[in-house]
Amino acid sequence: MKNILLIVIIFLCIGCTKENYPLGEVDDKVDYFSKREVKPKSQWNELDYLCDSMQRAYGIEIIYEYTPRIISGNTFFMPPQYDLALPYTKVVLDKMWLQPLKEKFPDFFKKETPIEFILAGGYVHFNNATATATAAGAGMNAQFYRLGMGGVNNFSLSKSWLKDHVVTLYHEHAHQIDHKYGRGYLYDRVSQGKYYGLSGYYTNPATGRQRTDDEAQKDGFFKPYGGYAPEEDFATSVEYMVKYPESTIKTFIAKNRDLESKYKMVHQMYMDMGINLHDLYKVVDSVVYKVNY
C-alpha cells in the first residue's frame, strides 16, 4: 500500500513540472495574457489617439497591439493589421456599436458594456495558428469584462459584411451575458434532450445534407448552430433577434413551441436589462444601411 501511495505522489509531482505543461516548451519571458506595453504618448499614432478618446467617451479600453495570445493550450488569436484596425475601430466600434448603444439604450450600455475590447486580426484558430477550424470570438469572451472579435483583417464597408459582423458581435456579447447572469434553470429545460451536439448541428444525419435554418427552426432553434448546445442556443437567439425584424422572428417562432418559449425568455431577460432586442434590430439596421461611411 505504501509503495502504491509513493508511486502516486511521484506521478503527481512529475505532472506538475514545466516539461509537462500543456504548451510544452514555455518561454518564461513571454506573458501571453498581458496587455500591450504602455506606449509613450510621443509614439502614438492615429489609432492610439482614437482609442484614447473612445476610452474617455465610453469607458472601454480597445486593445490592438499585443503578442499572439493563447486562450488555452491549442487555441490562438493574432493582432490585426494597423491599416484595417483603424477604419474598423472608427466604423464598427465607434459609429455602429458604442455610440448608438449609449444614445439609445443608456441603462444597458452603462451596466453591460465590457471594459476591454480586443481586436483579433484573423479568427480564433484551434490546434495551431494556421488551422482552418476557426471561430469569431470563442474563448475571448469567457470573462464578462472583456469582449473580443476576430476577422478585423477582413474589414469591409460592404453592407452585408458590416451587418453580419455587428450581429455576430452581439452574439459574442450574449455569451458574456450568459456567463454573468446565466440563462436560467427553465431555459435549459425547454430543449433538453433535443440538441444536435457537435456531430449533428452542421449535417442532418437523416438527409446527409447541411441543415437549413428552416429545419432548425422546426426543431426549436433559430439556426443549426443554436442546436449545438444550450449556450449557443441562447447566443444565436440574441443574434437572430438583432439580425431580423420582429415580424420575421414571429414567423420563425411560429414553427415550434419550444422556440417560441425560449424567444420569450430571452426577450424578457434583455428587457429587464434595459434593452428591447427588436428595437436594437432597428438601430443596427439603421446604422448599417442608412449611414454612409
Image: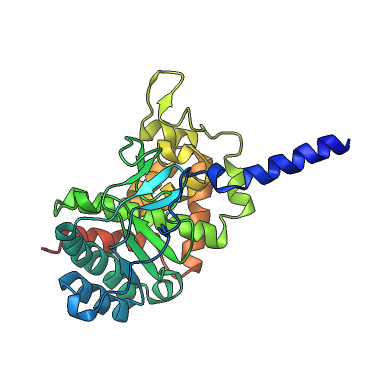
User: Looking at the image, how many numbered discs can be counted on the residues?
Assistant: 0
Residue sticking out furthest to the left: 292
Residue 245 seen in the figure: no
Residue 290, by quadrant, is bottom left
The image shows residue 73 at horizontal and vertical percentages of 47, 45
Asked whether, in this view, residue 200 is left or right of residue 62, the answer is: right
User: What residue lies at 16% left-to-right and 62% top-to-bottom?
Assistant: 87
Judging depth in this view, the residue of 140 and 206 nearest the camera is 140
User: What residue lies at 51% left-to-right and 47% top-to-bottom?
Assistant: 231
The image shows residue 242 at horizontal and vertical percentages of 34, 55
Q: Quadrant of the N terminus?
A: top right
Task: Check the image and tell me how it is coloured.
Answer: rainbow
User: What residue lies at 22% left-to-right and 68% top-to-bottom?
Assistant: 95
Residue 192, by quadrant, is top right
Judging depth in this view, the residue of 186 and 26 nearest the camera is 26
Instruction: Classify 206 as above or below 165.
Output: above
Instruction: Classify 174 as above or below 275.
Output: above
Instruction: Classify 142 as above or below 198.
Output: below
The image shows residue 28 at horizontal and vertical percentages of 45, 56
Instruction: Classify 44 as above or below 150.
Output: below
User: What residue lies at 22% left-to-right and 73% top-to-bottom?
Assistant: 48
Residue 39 seen in the figure: yes
Asked whether, in this view, residue 104 is left or right of residue 88, the answer is: right
